[in-house]
Structures are given as C-alpha cells and as structure tokens.
Image (spheres, rainbow, N blue to C red):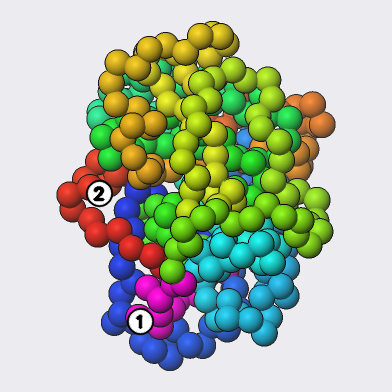
Amino acid sequence: MSSCIRLRLASSLRLNSSLPRSRILSRKLHERRPLQYPIEGGLGNFLPPPALKTAVEWQTGLLDRLNEEVKGTAEESTSVIQTVLNTSVSKERTLAFNYASLALNNSFFLDQLKPPPSEGANHEHEISVDLLRAIEEEYGSLRQLKSSISAAALGMFSNGWVWFVTDANGSTGILPTFGPGTLLVRSRTYMGSEKGLVLGDKLIVGGVSGDLPPTTSSPAGSATVKPQPPGTGSTSPLSGANFPNTPRAPDALGPRFSSTRAWNTEPRQGIFSMSETAAPLKKPTILTVGEEIYPLFCIPVYEHNWMSAGYGVWGKEDWLKEFWSVVNWAKVSKSYSTALSARNNFSFGTR
C-alpha cells in the first residue's frame, strides 16, 4: 500500500506510555505508514492514481531528505512533529525544519480525504449540524465557503497551503501559509485532533516527548541561512487577495510559524472578499480570542499536484473544483467537535 502522514487536528492527546518499549526503539528512521485508502484507486478526478502516486512519492522524498539532514543529530531518533518543534527556533536547522514541516502538512492534507462515493458527487451529507451551522454563519452557505477557499488558493502565486480552521469558540476561518509554514504546531503544541503517526513518524519513549528546549523570548532571527531546495523556502505575502492585515505581537517560535491572520466577521464575506474595506468587528475574532486555532483541512498550492492530475500548468482552478468531491466531511466534522470541547476537556501538550 501507499503511504501518507496521519495527524489529528484540534486536540493534543498525550502519548500512550503503555506501548512496548521494544516497538518504540526499533524504529530508527522515518518509515512510511500506509494511506487509509488504496493508491491504485486514486482520489477521483482530484488525484487520480498517477497523481496520488506523485503525492506519495513527494512525501517519501521529503522524509528521505529529512533522514539525511538529521543523521547524527538529536533529531535522528525523534518524531517528525518533534523535529518541527526542535528545529523551529534554530536558523541553522532551517533545512531540517522545512522537510519535516512539509511532510507534516502533506500527510495532514492526504489524511482528510477519501475516495468519492460510488453514488453521488461528494460526501457533503456527512457534515455535522454544528459545523454546517458555523459555516453558514460565517460564509452564508457551503457554496460560499468553497468559493472563498478557491479564491484564496487561486490568489497565491507562490507555493504554500490554504487552511480551513476553527477556534475553541467554533468560529471558522481561512488562513494561508507559505512554503513550509504550518498551522499544525502552535506555541509548542501539536494542534491535531487525531494523535496518529505522521507518514514516516516514530513513537517516542515515554517522557521524552515533553522534554523540549525552553521557548525563547524573542523570534528566531531572519539572517541568511543555508540554501534551500526549490519548493521549500518561505515566500512573499499573498498576492491577488484583499483582506484585513492586522499587526500582531511576534510569535515566540519565530517567523517559521507565522501566518497572515484574518478571520471572517460577516456572513458571505470571506477573508478573501474583494471588498477593499474590512467589515467592523461585531463578535470575537481570531484577532481577539487568542492563539489557539485548530486546522480542519488544508489544500496544497504546489504545481506538481494539478500537473500530475492531468490539468496542465494552468489547470489549478479546474483542479480545485474537484477537491470538494473527496473531502472527508465526517472526519472534518469530528475534528470540529473536538476543537469545541478542547478548551474544557483536553490538556494540550507537546509531542
């Protein structure tokens, strides 16, 4: 079978210390974990078999290069998530961070999908009542959400990711990250609701997962770092999309975890609305509710995805239309529910 990375969004569950020590220590390198669906069947017209194979090959390549980069270092025996955490504060470890973060994002992307149904065009009937209500409150309709997310992706003229996220209050929003930027790790906390193995991830000996270096009080420097391979470097701010851009305090983890913050405040006005004037804030938004946001799904804005799917260099828009046929709305809804209960029912921690 093929491989991918499995992550959960919304809550960070502690590692189960009852796992056999021999099983933990026997996994020296980032080994592949099978996808939850057969690669031979593909993902409809969004990622037909050759394209899904390309996505998995990219994942394998990221992990192979990560293994080489961390050889002989403390990260050689840590998980992908832990590698992201450990290298995020060190500009000398930028390449390792890039490989690990991209592998984390790509795994999460693949894990929120499933093949289209044999009958019907999509899995929208699996959306929970609570999530659908939240979408309608923020966007007016599911159709408008799709339009806003597509506009976000089409407005990106560089590599990156478009994320559909929520906070613990249930407000939803759309956020872009660029290059290897991720929303899966925030403030030394893994924000996934499903604490499974990332593709190539390893289990960690009990106790080690919490032993992280102290968070620095200032952001990582922006000085020149070692050269990065194509497709792994951070890029300029989003082009072609107009949305509020409010300054915020520096993130203690530095620019690698930074993203332009924007949040919907009115129905039918997504963060990628073409309106030049931001609507007045009438309720708590991502700018006021704090730092805890939980990714529900993401879309990669990398050319190899739509080209390998047969859409050509300029086929991004047609490719994006097919995304909605394979979204696993049952899983997304479960993650949304977990996020709502996270504030009271879960203890967030590092991994």
From the image, which quarter does the N terminus lie in? bottom right
The mark nearer the N terminus, 1 or 2, is 1
Residue 7 at x, y = what percent? 45, 56
Q: Nearer the viewer, residue 224 or 273?
A: 224
Q: Which amino acid, by three-letter code, is at mark 1?
A: Gly
- SS category of the residue bearing label 1: loop
Which disc is residue 206 wearing?
A: 1
User: In the image, is 311 to the left or to the right of 213?
Assistant: right
Give the x, y percent position of residue 105: 56, 51
Residue 187, percent from left and from top:
42, 54
In the image, which residues are magenta? 200-213
Helix, strand or loop: magenta stretch: loop
Q: Please state the total of marks drawn on the protein image.
A: 2
Find out whether residue 290 is within the magenta segment: no
Image quadrant where residue 314 sits = top right
Give 38 or 323, whichever is nearer the viewer.
323
Is 224 situated above or below 244? Answer: below
Number of residues whose C-alpha sits closer than 10 Å to that of mark 1, classed few (under 14), some (14–19) or many (20 or more): some
293, above or below 266, in the image: below
| Neighbours of disc 2 within 10 Å: few (<14), some (14-19), many (20+) | many
Q: Is residue 180 left or right of residue 203?
A: right
Q: Secondary structure at mark 2?
A: helix
* Residue 233 seen in the current view: yes
Q: At 68% from the left edge and 20% from the top edge, which residue is drawn?
A: 240
Q: Which residue is mark 2?
A: 342
Cα–Cα span, label 1 and label 2: 23 Å
Residue ID at (72%, 55%): 223
Q: Residue furthest bottom?
A: 22
